[in-house]
Image (spheres, rainbow, N blue to C red):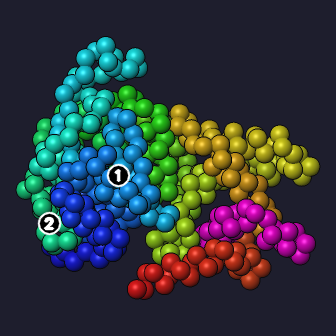
Amino acid sequence: MNFQPQIAPHITGIIAELQAAGYEAYLVGGAVRDFLLQRQPKDYDISTSATPEEVKKVFRKNRVMIIGRRFRLVHFYHGNEIIEISTFRKKPEPVSAAERPKKVQDAPENMIFRDNEFGTVQEDAERRDFTVNALFYDPVNDKLFDFTGMGVEDIKNGIVRAIGVPKVRFEEDPVRILRALKLVGQYGFTLEKETAEALQNSIELIKLASESRITLEMEKVLKNPYGEKILEAFHNNGFLKYFMPEIDSHWDHEDMEFIRDILTKRNERIRNGEYRESISLALSVFAYPSAARWIASAKKKTVQTKAFRMEIEDLVSSFFLPQHPTRRAIGAAARTLLLQPEFASNDPKVQDDLKRHPGYAHARELAFIRNSIRPFREDFEEVFPPSHKEYRSHKRNRKRKRT
């Protein structure tokens, strides 16, 4: 496969500093996979033989922070970017029944509850989830390592293959079920036969994953510029009913067809650098048809009350239960929805007030996408231009894509 990664200089610099200090260090996981697929990674993960404390000592002049308990690693802050630096792990020893949280007393014996037993790079590769995620690249010496012996070929052939015994891999961490299907949706990969069988037999184990982890994964999926394909893979494989049951139960409803159209267009614009990722905007997309009917049926004075806004927030929340996005994201989504009727107004004062509103950028993006799918005004772009801030961001993204 063609492998000519254009790695950001500061990433190579971090790896070079760790190596100069006497440690092994590699670019790992999704970034290497994306480079092999000739895609630019969204972020970078680094794995090293240095412990978190040793990493912090190497970069003492930089902003670094050790985080996590179940899985301790280092966050390296480079401007607004966070680079995760993890230490090589080996398969941890099982914990006793007394050490297990009450919620998961009956969980499979293979389930991992702590993962801080450090090991070698080979051991680290063998304990990862899928072959396509177990590739290590040294950008300083331009060397690619495929310790499972199947990662490169599986990427070439579009195969999601669990490392080791698939059943054990999903029992160790049920969130791997979600990650396997994300690969299917985002990249059009196919599950290897044994991996597919084990996934189906293990799918209910996702109920044992912590609410905070599942909520975080949900936010990642909703922000993902391939999110509509990921959700389709979840639905087709019977996983969406455990992950987002309200969305799954309405999958064939005409509202969901419109929602998927909006989401597809929104993600296309993100991929083209025409707008940024936003969890609150994604939340508003799923609630839009229901919220639009609710707002249209209410009196104008009622819509302007705090009580009505709280009702819209509750409506937004209901689509994602049992997950709980942050109140801030829910509030921003409700604001976006409440501003939608204003985009149909022909009153210059209403239009000017809307363009000065702090929620204009997201509200305008949702209205713009709606108008491109089901037109409601021909002069939309003339009357409602992008906000100055978003326009500048768009120009920067377009320039970045050209270079």
Mark 1 highlights which residue?
Answer: 56
Q: Nearer the viewer, mark 2 or mark 1?
A: 1
Q: Residues within 10 Å of mark 2 (few under 14, many from 20)?
A: some
Taking depth in this image into account, of 207 and 88 the one nearest to the observer is 88
Q: Amino acid at mark 1?
A: Lys
Report x, y in % for residue 231: 43, 51
Magenta residues, as a range?
346-375
Q: Nearer the viewer, residue 293 or 91?
A: 91
Question: Which residue matches tag 2?
Answer: 144
Residue 15 left/right relative to 313? left
Decide whether the magenta segment is chiefly helix, strand or loop: helix
Q: Report how many numbered discs are placed on residues in the image.
A: 2
Nearer to the camera, 51 or 373: 51
- Magenta stretch: includes residue 372: yes
Marks 2 and 1, the one that precedes in the sequence: 1
Q: Which element type, helix, strand or loop, lies under badge 1? A: helix
Q: Looking at the picture, which amino acid does disc 2 mark?
A: Leu
In the image, residue 68 above or below residue 373 = above
